[in-house]
């Protein structure tokens, strides 16, 4: 489609994009024609979903198997007190439909796993990994790398966050962490707590990376792991190079299918039956 296909309501809604040299009507149409998978509708997923919907990303696939709890509301800003007990995917869909009726929202009340990842990735332009467990993070990485789909990863802990973007030509998550740490060594948010605004910052980084990738502009967070310390209000970058011995994107990969991996907290290669 061309930018001339934008109707008067869209021209009004996205006017601040359309007047930008870096976006314009053609770029906005590109966003409207895009298909993005968001894995997780919690702390990270909430701002990602909010800003991608507002930006006019035409199709949002939201995968989450959890329900809204009152303790989520301190940080998961697309859910409300009236949503307590409602599946997060369904709550997120309702939020998007109220925010921007242009968007097609596909809400999937399930966990991303080996049995459905191929279906959810079919036709997707970008994946935003907002999951809160190592098994899903490694699954997203492996499935996207094997299919050449770019994705953004982020994680949060108390006052700290990290983010990286992976493209077919960049280092992947396994280049950084070939296998997950032993189970129980890293506490989750329910155990350690998390500053409520922290996932907002990191989710906005992820949403920004997604929009830039869809517009094919700017420098993505590839080959760089971004660390954010909210307590000190500092951002630092650590360069990341592709690991020739990486089991999924290296010179002699051990993983050529997600069936090669047992996606538990250990995510060990070659241990699946």
Image (spheres, rainbow, N blue to C red):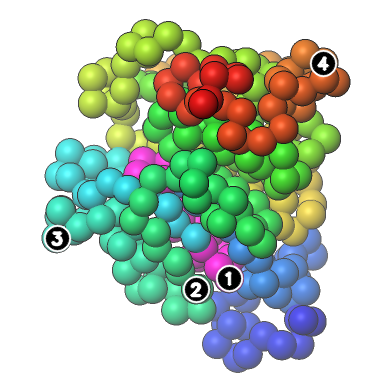
Residue that sits furthest to the front in the current view: 273
Disc 3 marks which residue? 82
Spatial CA distance of label 4 from label 1 is 37 Å
Q: Is residue 68 visible?
A: yes
Q: Residue at x 31, y 62 (%)?
A: 90
Disc 4 marks which residue? 244
Residue that sits furthest to the bottom in the current view: 8
The local secondary structure at tag 4 comes to loop
Q: Is residue 209 left or right of residue 76?
A: right
The image's mark for residue 104 is: 2
Spatial CA distance of label 3 from label 2 is 23 Å
| 205 vs 3: above or below | above
The image's mark for residue 58 is: 1
Spatial CA distance of label 2 from label 1 is 6 Å
User: Of discs 3 and 2, which sits in the foreground?
Assistant: 2
* Residue 130 counted in the magenta span: no
User: Of discs 2 and 4, which sits in the foreground?
Assistant: 4
| 159 vs 35: above or below | above
Percent coordinates x, y for residue 130 in the rendering: 47, 40
How packed is label 3: few (under 14 Cα within 10 Å), some, or many (20 or more)? Answer: few
Query: Residue 27: which quarter of the image?
Result: bottom right
Q: Is residue 67 left or right of residue 42?
A: left
| 182 vs 273: above or below | above
Q: Are marks 2 and 1 in contact (CB under 8 Å)?
A: yes
| 8 vs 205: above or below | below
Q: Earlier in the sequence, mark 2 or mark 1?
A: 1
Q: Earlier in the sequence, mark 4 or mark 3?
A: 3
Nearer to me, 59 or 164: 59
Range shown magenta: 40-60
Spatial CA distance of label 1 from label 3 is 27 Å
């Amino acid at each position: 489609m061309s930018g001339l296909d934008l109707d008067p309501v869209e021209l009004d809604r996205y006017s601040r994009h359309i007047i930008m040299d870096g976006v314009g009507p053609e770029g906005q149409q590109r966003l409207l024609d895009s298909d993005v998978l968001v894995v997780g509708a919690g702390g990270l997923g909430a701002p990602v979903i909010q800003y991608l919907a507002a930006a006019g990303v035409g199709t949002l696939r939201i995968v989450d198997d959890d329900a809204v709890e009152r303790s989520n509301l301190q940080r998961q800003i697309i859910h409300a007190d009236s949503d307590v007990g409602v599946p997060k995917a369904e709550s997120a869909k309702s939020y998007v439909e109220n925010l921007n009726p242009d968007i097609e929202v596909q809400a999937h009340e399930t966990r991303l796993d080996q049995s459905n990842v191929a279906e959810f990735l079919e036709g997707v332009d970008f994946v935003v990994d907002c999951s809160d467990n190592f098994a899903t993070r490694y699954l997203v990485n492996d499935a996207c790398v094997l299919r050449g789909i770019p994705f953004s990863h982020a994680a949060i802990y108390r006052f700290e966050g990290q983010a990286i973007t992976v493209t077919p030509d960049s280092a992947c998550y396994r280049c950084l962490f070939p296998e997950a740490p032993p189970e129980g060594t890293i506490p989750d948010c329910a155990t350690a707590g998390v500053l409520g605004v922290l996932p907002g910052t990191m989710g906005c980084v992820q949403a920004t990376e997604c929009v830039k990738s869809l517009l094919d502009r700017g420098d993505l967070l590839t080959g760089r792991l971004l660390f954010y310390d909210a307590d000190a209000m500092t951002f630092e970058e650590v360069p990341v190079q592709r690991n020739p011995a990486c089991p999924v994107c290296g010179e002699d990969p051990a993983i050529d299918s997600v069936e090669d991996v047992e996606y538990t907290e250990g995510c060990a290669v070659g241990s699946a039956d």
